[in-house]
Amino acid sequence: MSKPFMFEKPSGMRDTLPDLYQTKKAIREQMEEEIRLWGYEAIETPTLEYYDTVGVASAILDQQLFKLLDQQGNTLVLRPDMTAPIARLVASSLKDRAYPLRLAYTSNVYRAQQNEGGKPAEFEQLGVELIGDGTSSADGEVIALMVAALKRAGLKTFKVAIGHVGYVNALLLDVVGNEERAEGLRRFLYEKNYVGYREHVKGLNLSSIDKSRLLSLLKLRGGRQAIDDAASLIQTAEGEVVLNEMTKLWDVLESYGVADYVKLDLNLVLHMSYYTGVVFEGYGNRLGVPLCSGGRYDDLLTKFERPAQATGFGVRLDLLAEAIGEKPIEQKQTCIMFSNERRDEAVALASEKRRDGIAVVLQDISGVTDLDSMSDQYGEVIYCIGKAGKGGASE
């Protein structure tokens, strides 16, 4: 293996330059404040976790984990998501706190990308987990909060697609009869390979009616009417339970006034085994990929020996910044140029302006070779220099 060029970064790693940093900071602060107002408490977890606990429990594929060994030979992982670390936290440090718990986070997560050029291996994610509440009210709350946080961040045009793992599973099993055959169809949906799904259905040894039912699954999108359309495809007890949940969820979303931002998509599959109920993902009008996602995961806390029903969401801040597509209002800095004999005056003036909330750069004039460029770089330039310099204090 050749030695990396001095300016190279590891695959998938990115630098964040000042403009994007400020944009993400502004977005983050607005969303964190909205989340705080909904009663969620912010927490942090370590960057490194044990593979045998958090790594195994995570929803992220094993080949996407960054693994390393500690000095005792234990396998560690860079946290690939925040849900599993929070589950560990809830079952340990917060084990004496009663359910439900409302927790929030903003953290970098790490996912190794295999032959996928351009995808980041490290990115900042903001989200919440509502743990210990299995009601449709809880599902509706996290979706409504996600909508409110996206709006507060400045995203004007977006949609949240909502599905239910239980409906997909019930319909597929009802038609094809066993889990192995259902798994093949479910994978096409998970990969959003709808062409492959259609071709696979056409090749199955099924009646034309059953093939039509499977193909109609791809059309179950829209508003509340999609629930009635879904009911016409399946009459099993499992399917009825799921559709009752979706009806309750829609009522909750209408109560929050966010129905215009959501649409039902009952063929939505976000993970093959992790999610257990309602799932959702959000799209901005500038992106072709989801910028946020979430759903119900009622089995995860059992792995940490503190069973609880749970739901939550995560937002990719880099993708959200791209979807918003607007830079925050640039706050021009003030630069105070000084010579040695007037340093004290310059420092005092800088302190006064900083107390007023103005960003100030102090610059020794002997360290500048191009004075004319300073006025282009800063919104205001003040000179505190002696007779040997440019002259008296001026702007």
Image (spheres, grey):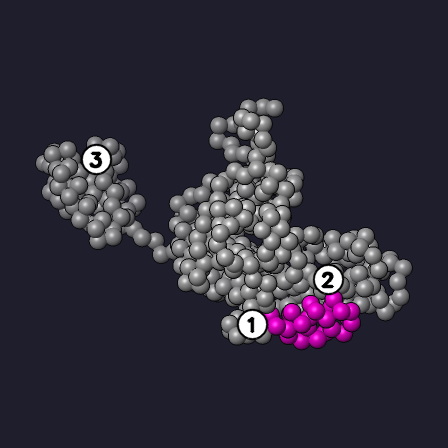
Which of 72/175 is in front? Answer: 72
Which of 392/330 is in front? Answer: 330
Number of numbered discs visible in the structure rendering: 3
Q: Give the range drawn in magenta.
A: 222-249
Q: Give the x, y percent position of residue 356.
A: 21, 53
Q: Identify the residue at horizontal 52%, vertical 66% (top origin).
A: 141
* Sequence-first tag of 2 and 3: 2
**Is 64 within the magenta?**
no
Residue 364 visible to the viewer: yes
Q: Identify the residue at horizontal 50%, vertical 57% (top origin).
A: 98
* Sequence-first tag of 1 and 2: 2
Q: Are marks 3 and 1 in contact (CB under 8 Å)?
A: no
The secondary element bearing badge 2 is classed as helix
Q: Identify the residue at horizontal 45%, vertical 50% (top origin).
A: 43
Q: Give the x, y percent position of residue 143.
A: 54, 64
The secondary element bearing badge 1 is classed as helix
Q: How crowded is mark 2: few (under 14 residues within 10 Å), some or many (20 or more)?
A: many
Seen in the image, is 118 located left or right of residue 40?
right
Mark 1 vs mark 2: give the one in front. 1
Measure the C-alpha gap from mark 3 to mark 1: 61 Å
Look at mark 1 in the image and give the residue it sits on. 252
The secondary element bearing badge 3 is classed as strand
* Sequence-first tag of 3 and 1: 1
Residue 268 visible to the viewer: no
Measure the C-alpha gap from mark 1 to mark 2: 22 Å
Mark 3 vs mark 1: give the one in front. 1
Q: What label sits on residue 232 in the rendered view?
A: none
Mark 2 vs mark 3: give the one in front. 2
Q: What label sits on residue 168 in the rendered view?
A: 2
| Quadrant location of the N terminus in the rendered image | top right
